[in-house]
Image: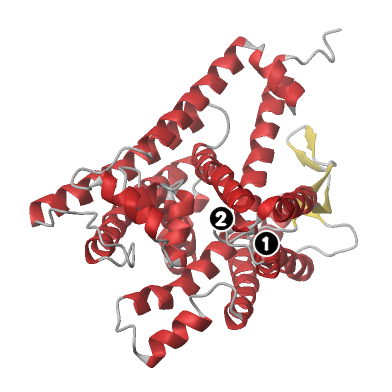
């Protein structure tokens, strides 16, 4: 990996792309520290030192914003509205035939879906910024803090804060697209990578210098290395289904006769099931924060659902991850559509008849692989939480293994893109 980066920086064109990408990531991190107009930054810092947010949903947004949420900065929402909008647009393909037709149109249809995603991102940013400002003004965001983070709660000031945070989300979306067009890698993924990686040093340092000690810090580091190795092994693994194309005459030319394969990843849903499961489990706790804290149902929700180490929370978390793995895989991979495309172009799986038998075989393979992938995702998501409970260590890294999956996955994809561009520029095979 280091040699690939060294060769990349020695290539002028690729060096410019890498430096441009690093500059955009630096601007993104800088915006995380600029407070929103109307926010008392000293009071925010004092509240962060005195309290900690108990909401997993706010913790998820804070994770993808690189800690900017709790600072109430201009980039407080981070990339989360865009992620949510992208997932919603993908799910709507099943419900709205127009979206599915646009998806099949190719580049023009994809551009239209991207435009819808941008509009939905802005709408979600307005909704989320209003919610976060409301929780900060009412004291729910920093429970137990004696200071007011928004001294002026007039309508005009609150409106300016909503517009600023929404504009910050639009700017982040534009920065991500700039990286994709003029930099290296997927821009949105790299911004997520930057946000999560920025929270690692402080969280690990809090374990070493706080409630953990050096011994537990070493154990946590060793656990992270094991989880990273497991993630790399599984994310690089794939089931290759062989496909043979029959020869056919088109005019006077012979086409086909080639062999290829369909690559199927073990974890086709990536980290999306973890995001869905965490968000759903966080909603009851978020509702309970606005209710009377002395009520019986509020205390039950706090003890069993809002506490990430509670047995009921862990069981529901595992079940939801497995469910959303199958749900999202069923949406993104359609065996009937793949079988029809293969039949149209004269392709077939050796030993399997074309048409309906091919679709049934693909569905059988996908079901088995998704079962293994869902169990892997649940194990990776639960290992850090269970280990921290056993070690009696509290940490600021939300959702444990999900952040490691994102960081490792984005890192692998970025290195692959750099390596492929290096091969294009330094290929010498037939030229010698």
Q: Name the secondary structure under disc 2.
A: loop
Left or right, residue 430 beside residue 37: right
Residue that appears at 79% across and 49% down: 229
Left or right: 241 in relation to 338: right
Residue positioned 54% across, 38% down in the render:
190
Furthest residue toward right: 351
Q: Is residue 71 visible?
A: yes
Residue picked out by circle 1: 384
Closer-to-camera residue (20/267): 20
Nearer to me, 357 or 311: 311
259 lies above or below 311: above
For the residues labelled 2 and 1, say whether their Cβ atoms are less than 8 Å apart.
Answer: yes
Q: Secondary structure at mark 1?
A: helix
Give the total of numbered labels.
Answer: 2
Residue at 89 percent of width and 57 percent of height: 350
Instruction: Please say if 15 is above or below 129.
Output: above
Quick check: 363 above or below 80?
A: below
Tell me: 11 left or right of 167. right
Q: Position of residue 211 (x, y in %)?
A: 60, 58
The C terminus - image quarter: top right
Q: Nearer the viewer, residue 187 or 407?
A: 407
The reply, left or right, for residue 188 in relation to residue 174 is right
Q: Quadrant of residue 330?
A: bottom right
Q: Which residue is mark 2?
A: 397
Q: Tell me residue 360's x, y (percent).
A: 76, 71
**At which x and y percent is residue 12?**
60, 10
Q: Residue at x 33, y 63 (%)?
A: 141
Q: Quadrant of the N terminus?
A: top right
């Amino acid at each position: 990996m280091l040699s690939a980066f060294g060769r990349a920086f020695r290539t002028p064109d690729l060096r410019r792309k890498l430096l441009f990408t690093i500059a955009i990531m630096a601007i993104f991190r800088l915006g995380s520290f600029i407070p929103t107009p109307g926010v008392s930054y000293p009071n925010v810092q004092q509240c962060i030192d005195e309290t900690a947010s108990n909401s997993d949903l706010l913790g998820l947004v804070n994770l993808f914003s690189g800690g900017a949420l709790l600072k109430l900065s201009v980039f407080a929402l981070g990339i989360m509205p865009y992620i949510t909008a992208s997932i919603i647009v993908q799910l709507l393909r099943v419900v709205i035939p127009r979206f599915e037709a646009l998806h099949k149109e190719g580049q023009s249809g994809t551009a239209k879906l991207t435009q819808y995603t941008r509009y939905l991102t802005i709408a979600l940013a307005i909704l989320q910024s209003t919610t976060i400002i409301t929780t900060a003004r009412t004291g729910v965001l920093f429970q137990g803090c004696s200071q007011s983070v928004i001294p002026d709660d007039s309508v005009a000031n609150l409106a300016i804060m909503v517009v600023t945070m929404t504009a910050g989300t639009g700017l982040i979306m534009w920065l991500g697209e700039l990286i994709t067009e003029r930099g290296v890698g997927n821009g949105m993924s790299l911004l997520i990578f930057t946000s999560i990686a920025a929270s690692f040093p402080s969280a690990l340092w809090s374990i070493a210098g706080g409630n953990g000690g050096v011994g537990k810090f070493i154990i946590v580091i060793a656990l992270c290395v094991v989880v990273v190795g497991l993630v790399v092994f599984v994310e690089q693994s794939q089931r290759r289904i062989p496909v043979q194309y029959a020869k056919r005459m088109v005019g006077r030319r012979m086409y086909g006769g080639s062999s290829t394969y369909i690559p199927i990843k073990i974890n086709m849903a990536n980290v999306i099931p973890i995001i869905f499961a965490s968000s759903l489990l966080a909603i009851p706790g978020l509702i309970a924060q606005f209710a009377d804290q002395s009520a019986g149902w509020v205390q039950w929700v706090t003890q069993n659902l809002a506490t990430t180490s509670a047995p009921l929370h862990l069981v529901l978390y595992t079940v939801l991850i497995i469910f959303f793995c199958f749900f999202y895989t069923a949406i993104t991979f359609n065996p009937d559509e793949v079988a029809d495309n293969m039949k149209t172009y004269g392709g077939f799986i050796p030993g399997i008849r074309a048409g309906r038998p091919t679709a049934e075989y693909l569905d059988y393979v996908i079901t088995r692989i998704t079962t293994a992938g869902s169990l892997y995702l649940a194990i990776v998501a639960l290992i850090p939480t269970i280990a921290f409970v056993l070690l009696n260590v509290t940490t600021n890294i939300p959702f444990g293994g999900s952040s490691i999956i994102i960081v490792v996955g984005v890192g692998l994809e970025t290195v692959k893109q750099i390596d492929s561009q290096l091969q294009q520029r330094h290929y010498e095979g037939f030229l010698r």
